[in-house]
């Protein structure tokens, strides 16, 4: 039985939409947690500090040491939720590519995980970023490719021409 | 010179995304206002009362007498903003079709308006409604067609297979 | 009959809470509109540009020429809504003090307006700003006094020691 | 060293505000997680179903079996985060009073926890619920007392007359 689904993709690639659709089409009740949940749980001051996250004007994102510490504990906790019986969809942005996947691989080592890459053409993602009213534009383009570098998947979907619901059905067909 | 762009379409048809993109691609600064702005400005108690708006379990929407009174004044005010020099994008859901358009036609009679129909296949809109995490599902499907009944447009776009940005560029080409 | 209630106060002074309470306690249905509504209606790009609004790291706010143009039209439109029969609560931050009031006085000249100052001790407002999870801290303190400079009121309330609901009842007692 | 701070109080009692202030005044970086985080992570369909959460018109809240299953796993996961080195503020509503505390006591048994009761006069909380623009009113009043029944605290704060920041400083003084 699949215990965790990890969705990895850049900003505005459509991960969250797919997560909502997965929750709707999968037979059991799944929790959807992700980078956004973690960032919201952090102190507001970490949003713009050396220790936390920095959103550069060009859409780049830099995270500091305290962010990494809290993130490591967060990952352990999400794994513990799955071990305790919750089926979990993880909605992630592997800014460091393969290195970021390693962090999750370690914590999820004893769990059955479906690794899913969520791709989206860089220009299309950039357009969707504008369509969502984002004030800082550029994150979608800067993350589109780097988040997939060296990452190994069981399955990849591409939202460039496919709806979130369609991608969710494709993924759901691989969930045991 | 186009003074007002009216975007009419059902829930989850993509109007707001197109409005954000229009604001990004049009040379001047346009205000984007719409049904959502009006509803948020109303008393919270009107959200679930006979006088205000009622969201039925199947996605239907019923509005009462007090809603109509405030809406009529709102429409006059938006027209006045355009007359006072703001270029305005109106993001609307013509629940009553042609009758709803009449309300705006009256208020905007002396202004140069570009009327745009935003279509989306009903099943696709329903999928996008789920992908946005909406708790009440059904509004997209129930509104997809009725909002266009008897409405006259200068231009129609269809988001079923086109991105918001692409639709926005098509519309922008008609703005003088 | 009072047609417009203008609430003026600094960020985190409690204006929005009072506006929600006024909508609940006043017998008729009032629209609540304000600076936040206007800012959300503006292009996202104006949030961080010379032409639009700039939020300084210390909480200061600078607005540019295009902001002023859209704001002037917005004010005319809100006045037109009141003239067309909607009773309106305006939730404002008079960054320019008396000069900002002049802009509204001109547009509302023929309407019966209740001018209300919403005061809050600077240190208390700064604490509430933190309690709301604001990322940029400092706006509450920097605006607490300047927004009232030279502004003339019919009535003043102070949220330092009074609840929003209590302030709303005080204001409501002055509404004819 | 305090590893977890549990804040328990009814809706609109001011827990979230205190949590934001604690994150600002405590020397380390703390994660703030709570009922709201969990509910947002659940499938949208569970918001209004027998299996999930039901918000009654009078402000009552009923949760079903699937909610309890996911909640149990969530609690284990939050405990695991604390064990893995994140200091965590838990922002909770013990709808079942002592029984709800038992669920957390079990999971947090080996951790140093500061149990904090967040009280607020029922009528004041009800007023603040309106001031926050809530559509469904009644939750604050119905939860004000029941959430504390049989619950044991290290410390209690009362937001009726004290600011969030003041309460946060009182709590912080008990954090080792």
Image (cartoon, coloured by chain):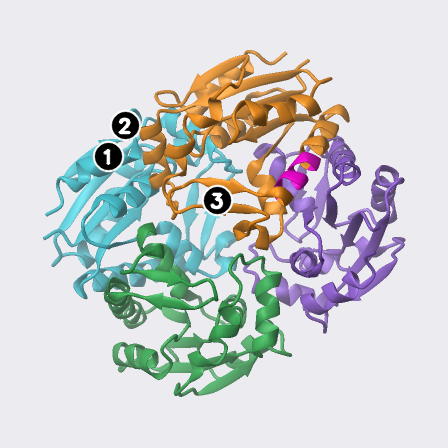
Chain colours: A green, B purple, C orange, D cyan
Q: Chain of mark 1?
A: D
Please report whichever mark, 3 or 1, sits nearer to the chain's N-terminal start: 3
Residue D55 marker: 3
Q: Residue at x 47, y 74 (%)?
A: A143
Q: Is residue A51 left or right of residue B163?
A: left
Residue situated in front as seen by the camera: C30 or D72: C30
Crowd around label 1: few <14 · some 14–19 · many ≥20 (10 Å): many
Residue under numbered circle 1 = D167
Question: Could you tell me if the residues under marks 3 and 1 are in contact, i.e. CB atoms within 8 Å?
Answer: no
Mark 3, secondary structure of its residue: strand
Q: Is residue A136 above or below residue A91?
A: above
Q: Which residues are magenta?
A: C67-73
x, y percentage for residue C136? Answer: 39, 46
Answer whether residue C69 is magenta in the image.
yes
Mark 2, secondary structure of its residue: loop
x, y percentage for residue B50? Answer: 68, 33
């Amino acid at each position: 039985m699949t215990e965790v689904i990890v969705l990895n993709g850049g900003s505005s690639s459509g991960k969250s939409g797919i997560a909502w659709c997965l929750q709707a089409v999968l037979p059991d009740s799944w929790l959807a947690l992700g980078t956004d949940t973690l960032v919201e749980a952090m102190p507001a001051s970490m949003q713009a500090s050396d220790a936390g996250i920095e959103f550069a004007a060009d859409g780049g994102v830099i995270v500091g040491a305290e962010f990494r510490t809290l993130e490591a504990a967060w990952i352990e906790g999400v794994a513990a939720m799955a071990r305790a019986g919750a089926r979990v969809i993880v909605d992630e942005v592997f800014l460091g590519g393969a290195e970021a996947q390693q962090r999750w691989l370690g914590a999820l080592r004893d769990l059955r995980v479906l690794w899913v890459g969520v791709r989206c053409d860089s220009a299309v993602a950039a357009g969707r970023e504008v369509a969502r009213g984002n004030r800082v534009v550029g994150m979608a383009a800067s993350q589109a490719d780097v988040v997939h570098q060296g990452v190994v998947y069981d399955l990849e979907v591409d939202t460039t021409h496919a709806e979130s619901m369609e991608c969710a059905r494709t993924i759901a067909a691989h969930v045991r």
